[in-house]
Each structure stands twice: as C-alpha cells, then as structure tokens.
Image (cartoon, grey):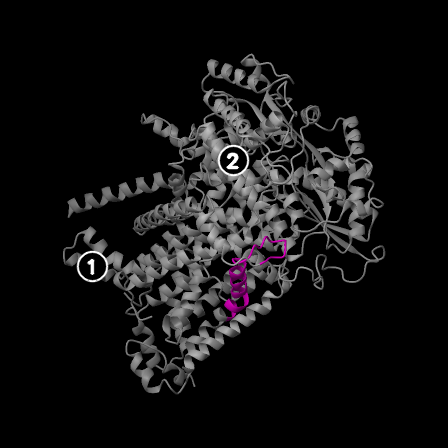
Amino acid sequence: MATLKEERYIGKNGTRLETVRGRISKLSPGYLYILPWVIGFLLFQLYPFVTSFIYSFTDFSILKPMSFVGLDNYKKMFTADRLYWTSLKATFKYVLIAVPGRLIFALFIAMILNMKLKCINFFRTVYYLPSILGGSVAISILWRFLFSRNGTVNVLLKALGIPPVDWLGNPNLALGTMGLLVIWQFGSSMVLFLAGLRNIPTELYEAARVDGAGSVKVFFKITLPMLSPIIFFNLIMQTINAFKEFNAPYLITQGGPLNSTYLYGMMLYENAFAFLKMGYASAQSWVLFAIIMLFTALAFKSSPYWTYYEDGGDF
Amino acid sequence: MRKGEVKKNTRLILSYIFLCILGIIMVYPLLWMFSASFKTNNEIFSSFTLIPKKIVTGAYSQGWKGSGQYSFGRFFSNTFIMVLPTVFFTIISSLLVAYGFARFKFRYKKPLFALVLASLMLPTEVVIIPRYILFNTLDWLDSYLPFIIPAAFATHSFFIFMLVQYIRGIPKELDESAVIDGCSSFKILTKIIIPLCKPAIVSVAIFQFVWRWNDFLNPLIYISSVRKYPLSLALRMTLDVTDTIIWNQVMAMSVLSLIPPVLLFFFTQKYFVEGIATTGLKG
Amino acid sequence: MKKRSRVILGFLLVLVFSMVFAGCSPASQPDSSSKPDTSKEVSGKEDVTQQTVTLRFSWWGADTRHQATLAAMELYSQRNPNVKIEGEYGAFSTFYQKLLTQLAGRTAPDIISVDYKWTHDLMKQGSPFVNMYTLTDKIDMNGFDLDFAKIYGGDDDYPIGLPAGVNGMGYLYNVEFLKEFGIEPNNEWDWETVIENGKKVQAADPSKHLMYNISEHWVYLLKTMLKQINGNTILNDDYSLGFSRDDIIQVFDYIRRLVETGTVPPFEEGVLYENVYADQNPNWLNQNFGIFPTSSSLIPGIAAASDFELDVFRYPVPKDAVDPGILVTPSMFITIYEHSKYQDVAADFIDFFFNDEEAIMILKDTRGVPANEKAKEMLVREGIVPKQVSDMVSQSLTGAGIAENGPSLNPEVIALIKDYIQQVGYLKLTPEQAADEFMKELEALAASLK
C-alpha cells in the first residue's frame, strides 16, 4: 500500500513516475497531509470570511438588524469619505518605510550576529528583546519620552548643536518616527535570517574565496541568492502585516497629528468599534484584502526570477 | 598573514562596539521598566533616568497579589495552560500541512495555497464578531478552546508558509534516496524532514510562544472571567484613569511577565542557529 | 467539463455550509431568544430564592475600585448565600469593544457598567437594558435625580440605569505655580482672564505655559463656548447645526489666540500628550504647566502623581453668557442587561449596591462623588470625598450648562471637531477657512447620521 502511494511522490524525475503509475492511486497523499488545514479552514475561517463579506454590502452596526445597501459602502469609500484617501496614502507611505527598513536592518544585524563572537547568545537575546516587549504598556510611555520636545533624542541632538525637532508632533515626521519603532522590533525577521544564514553550506564560501571573490561579491553572489526563499517569505509577511498595522498608531499617535499617521488599520478599527459602522468597515477591509492580494500575487509572479530553491523551483 | 590578522581583529572590535551601542538601545526599555518598578508614579512619568531618586519597595509583592481576588500566580499558570498546548498543536499541524504543500503534487495545489495565504490578509477587526458568534455557538467562550483547537487545525498560516519555505530548501535528493529505500512518505517526514527542519521548528515554537504570550485582543474578546485571565489581560486590568493606577506594580508585573519568553529564547537559540551545515548531513 | 462541474459543486457545498452557519448569527435573526445565554452555570427556572444564582457584573477601573467592589459583592453574598456574583473587570480603553461584541453575541453580563458617551448609540440600536421605571418597587431610587439620569442615560420614559457618580468640569491648578506668577485663582474667570494670565506666564518665563488641553478637552472647550454664546448644543436634536458661522469663527479664533499667545504650548509640542492625562505628562509633573482643565473624576489619579499642592476653581464663564455651559455628567451607569435571566436578583443587588449603608461605606467614592444623595451625605459627613473633588463638583453645579444631546455626543462628530481644532491649532487654516469647511463637513456628516 505504502509503496503504491509513493509512486506519486515527486522528485526531480518524479513527474515521469507519476505518469506511469499515477493512475493506480487517484488521491495524492498530499491531500492527506493538508487535511488538518482544510478542516480548520472550513470550520474556523470560512464562516467569518463569508460573513464579513456579506456585511460589506449591508449597514450592519453590530447591534441593530442589518439591511442590504448594495454597493453603497464601496461607493462611499471612494467618493464620500473625507479621510479614506488620506489614510490609504499614509498606509502606502508606511509600507514603503517599514518593510524595506525592517528587512535591511534585520539582515544586517543577522549577518553580524552570525559571526563567531564571544557572548553571542547574550547579544542575540538582547536584540530579540524589543520583539518580546511587543505592545507592552511601557512602550508608549517610553516612546513619548524619547521623542518629545525635551526628550532624549533632542537632548542628544542638542549636544551636536542641532535645534530640537518635534518628532511625533510634526505631521511631516510623525509617520517616519513611527516607522522607527516598528523597525526597532525586527527580532522575528532577524531570527529567520539567522537560521537561513546557518543553512548556507560553508564550502560555497570556501570555493568563492579560492576564486578570489571579495566580500561584497560573495554577499551578492552567494549569501543573497541562498537566502532568497527567506527574504521572499519575510517580504511577503512584512508587507501583509504593514498594510494591516494597527498597534503602532493606536499606541503612540492615535492617528495624528493632522491624520498623518491615520493608517488603514486605525481607520477600520474606528469605523467598526467607535462609529459602529461594521458594514462599512467590512467593505474597507475587503478593499484592503484586494490590495494586499495584488501585491502578494505580484511578488509570487516575480519570484522565479529572483529566488532560488533546492527543489528546483518545482512547486 | 599578520596584516590580515590585524584587519580581522579591528573588524572584530568594531563589531563589538557596534553591537554594544545598538544593544543599549535594544535593552534600555527593559532596564527602564525594571527601574520604574521601584519608582513613584511621579518619577515614572517625569524622568527618563534609570536610577530612582526615591526607592519604593514592595511593588513586586503587592503587585503579585493582583486586585485582591486572584494573584499573579494564577494568571501565570492560566497563560501557560493557554499557550503551551497552542504552541504544541501549531507545530504538529503546521508541519504536516507544510510538508503536504512542499513535497507533493496534487490538483488545485496552487489555489489552495493561495487560500492559506489569503487567510492572513483580511484585517481581524471585521472578523472578530463572526468569530465570536461562531465560538459562542460552539459553546467555547470563556475557555481556552478558541485558542487551542484552531491551532490543532493549522489555522496559523504564517507558520505553514514559513515551514514550506524551509522544507523547499532541503535538497530533494535526500528524500528520493529514501523512497528508493522503500520509506513511506510519513517516514520521510519523521526521519529526514523533521531533523533537518529543527531550526525552523524551534523558530515556530519561539514565535508562537511569544505571540500567544503577548496576545491581548483575542483573550479580551473570548475570556470573561477574571479567574481565567491570562497575563496580557491581567497586566491591563488596572489601567483606568478615573482611578489611581499604581504604576510601579504594573511595571513590576510586566517585568516578571517577560521572564518566560526571554528564558525560552535564550535557551533554545542554539537550535535555530544550528543549521544544516552543522548537522553534518549536508556539509 | 466533468472537472469544472466538480469544482462548482464543491463551491456550492462550501456556500451552503457557510449559509447554515450564517443562520446562527443574531444579526439575521434579531428576535430569536431560543438560544440560552448568560449564566451557563445555572439552568432552570426563575425561582431564584431557592437556587444558587450566579450573576455576572462588569465594570472598569483600577485597584481601589476593584477591591471595594469585590468587597461589596462579597458582603452581598454573605447576606444572600444563594447568590454568587462574578466580577468581570478590566481597563476602560477596551471595555466598549468587548461590550459591543458581547451584545452582538447576546452574552453580556447581567449587570453592566455603561459610560454616558455610549448610551445614545446603544439606544439607537434597540433597548439592550432593562427600563429602570419597571424596577421602582425593587430599587429605592429616592436618592437619585432621575431627570438628570435620563438626559445622559436614556430618554423620557426609559432610564437605562442608575448613575453611580456625578462628574463636573473645572480647572485643576498647581497652587505654587499660580502664586509664583502672581495669578489669582477665583471662580470669576472668563475666557479673557485665561489669555491675560497666559501672557503673564509667557512674559515671565517663555518655557512655561499657563495650561495645556488634551484633545478630549479641546472638544469640551469648543462645545462649552458655543453654548455660552448661543445657548445651544453643537447639533440640535433634529441634527441641524446649533450655531452660526460667526459663532464658530469666534471659537476658532479664540483657539488660535490661545496658541499664539503661548497660553497653551504649541500643538507640535503638546500633541504628543493629547491622549494622556496630567498624571502622565512630564511637563505637568515638572511644574512647567499651571492649570489642567479636567473632569472631577480624574483628580485622585492626578493628585497621586503630583508632588505639589493642588486646588480647583470654577470653569470660565463670561459675564454675558447665554448659558453658563459647564459640563456636568453622570460618571457611570449601572444597568441590567435585557437578556439577563435573573433581572430581579440583579435589581436587588443594585439596590444594595447603592442604598445599603454598609455597602456605601465599603464603596466610598471609588466611582466619584455618589449620585445618590443619601450616599453622598454619608460620605461628606465622614469626610471621605477629597476636598478638591467635591469642590469641583459643587462649583460646576453653580454653572451647569444645558445637557449634551445624542447628536452632539456622536463619536464621528467628535472626531470631526478634533480634526478642525488641530487644523486651527497647527495654524494650517484661518478661523474663517476652518469655519466654512467645518460647517460644510458637519452638515454632510449630520445628514448621514440622521
């Protein structure tokens, strides 16, 4: 029995095997392995998804019976909501700051922490700490200390002769400052990069060194390509999370000043749980869903050109 | 040779200096929280320094008592009861599903995988209420089942995707030779894939542990009885401006609540940095 | 072909499956009461005197309130051994979201604390709470001013609950600070006095400011000034605007002058602390600001963090004010959930909670100055209410303005007001520009809310 199933097993030559004996067992064991997810999806995820999609065509307000309003919510979003475009623009800007910032920073630190240094375990833990702190109550208190008019950052700048800056009070700077907080919590990307770096076979580096390649060349010719599946994963996940970001504006700026940090997640939350416009918030969510989907699809489409897999890209 | 050594040494020293300076920025909040647990309300909000002007003791023993009804011992054990099974089931279920996606060909695989990812893309705000109604229908509210059971059915797509990426990084030749040896697909999973994925599995454990440990929104919605509160709820239980918040106790309990995730990270990191290269299979 | 039909079949199955689930949603079946709710611990009928009853009671607060409330609940259970009360308590900031979710799932506690800012929205959606008029024989309401309660918590014939406390708006000040700058605090201030003294502080020390407003307070300031100018709330009950262009220009211009004279810190600097109270503002704690306009309920928390002497005086009221305008509100309504199985027991507990002398002495002023006259007198007699708190409440009562109405308390309206105050405060818009745009947007918003 087991051997019959294995015929479906694919390797680099697997496709041929499959065509010869594949017909014997109709069902790939792949289905068996993904079964938990299928059940979980049907049980726990499908219903909330479908419901929120239905909400998006209604005036659902959480407590009152809802009635259908057709495409009104979608129309309103694009034509009659004074903050929608402001929020969308802020969100895109934020994604452009936070995603590359975090990835580059995490990769950079991972490269350093991958070196054979003393106390490296201690350093790795220290660098992961901000991610453990998460949304702790202390964070918003500290952040205000750091970036207020008389805050630590301005005190340091003063020593260099630079006049004080209103980091979070200036509408042009607030979003970038908030981005710093998010970049500071780069721990999980760093862990993934570290694990990925350790997986690069040392003989590749040795061979490169024999060929006389400089460290910059080694980085671009060996490190980056070998890390590409992890970079790809981090890129997708960070993009999805950045588009949905809620904690940072909620904890630090409440969307201000002058709505400069009024991110999409913040807008959704207000519409859903402060203004009781759950139907409208659902419509906005589905638009965001479509935007994220588009970006993810583009990333997947482009991935064969820049990612390298040991399985030969056969998915 | 000697010139190279000097260069190497200076690079090493520079790395240390850099790591230390940046490390201070990373660790400062924790140190501040620790010192804040010995400060008065006034000092916590009026100065940024680490050393308290006037040391207040007793925040730990007083804070541990909670609001009188249940102590933080209870909240700690609640959190473990909620988080540990969730982490365990996440690992098992995500591994199986990721293996299925990464190593087999089957019909509709790509659209199905797209669905896996799609479930990450809808903002949670708008699914909170239907999910709440669903768990209410199942009569699971005010228990830890809404956390544990979905984890057993691989609903944390992040980890599926992550493990798929790692498994695809394992050369197929390894399992092909096992097929020739007559191994079943499950045996390949346990004998080849899992040992080689150890770093990734440990990462899953760390991430999921830390995220569930800190998760606030889901417990807020699903848990009502104070008796069943996890730490994340208990820590915010007394934050109300129309009453007097005793901040040093809040900070003290926040510091304690960080200990388990920090210890977990510190003691398991050797596994995720122990890549394939060091297990000898590939090197 | 065959393949395609199978896909379609699968899709249909999925759809049916989800529709079946969707049927469980209360949203689609608003009136079904077949589902068991709340106290799962007890099944069976209403004869409550014989059986053990478990009531759930939710509130927000910090340690002192939690401990006092738990102690009162304990006392009630001692006297009524068949009743067990479970407290569900937490932080204020997330309380409303949880309550909304529970109302949607019909799983809300038997006794619920409700903020006056929510009542209008909640009432628009049906009647989630038991009408207090139906319980007059079970709860002694003689100590309560039900007319006051109804304005903020219900409508003419439907008070949703009993107010736990009374809150008044006023000026909390740093005694030393005002003395240092030769400023005399008294109950006769008007808006010009504020600016004069603001200039005085700036002239003596440009790094200090007379006062600072949090964003919530800027909204009160605007609403109060409008009431003082024309006697109306910002939106009338029929959602028409309660002010003219000249009125709002006057207010916006005043806000601009507060900023330009340095009476308040520049917005760029102050905005960082616009969502936390004085107890968390380093400039207040380090005595760089002298006055914090606040509601009386926040005083104990601020006093605990401030290392200097505090006192209060009355909110500014111009001599020629049409309406004195000062905001006086109930602090927290204690309500009974309409789907509670044990409404009688809940009512009995509420009666005990508000009227029992032992309970009053346990709960003290943990929910502000009690709205119940009897309790208030007892606490005053025992000297339990801090002087600043009771002073601020009585000062505000000498100039209590017309009450806010539902349209004016709408969270979207408040968000819009905050927005335009920032536009003016950041000096991005002149008062005239701001007035025109604000009126246009408020009218559009009001039309959509109607």
**Residue C439 numbered mark, or none:** 2
Marks 1/2 same chain: no
Q: Which segment did they paint magenta? A: A39-67
Image position, residue A305 (x, y; %): 25, 62
* In the displayed structure image, the side of residue C264 where residue B226 appears, left or right: right
Quadrant of the rendered structure where residue C153 is? top right
Disc 2 secondary structure class: helix
How many circles with numbers are drawn on the protein?
Answer: 2
Image position, residue C391 (x, y; %): 69, 24
The kind of residue on which mark 2 rests is Met
Quadrant of the rendered structure where residue C242 is? top right
**Residue A206 numbered mark, or none:** 1
The kind of residue on which mark 1 rests is Glu
Q: Is residue B129 magenta?
A: no
Image position, residue C259 (x, y; %): 47, 24
Q: Nearer the viewer, residue C266 or B216?
A: C266
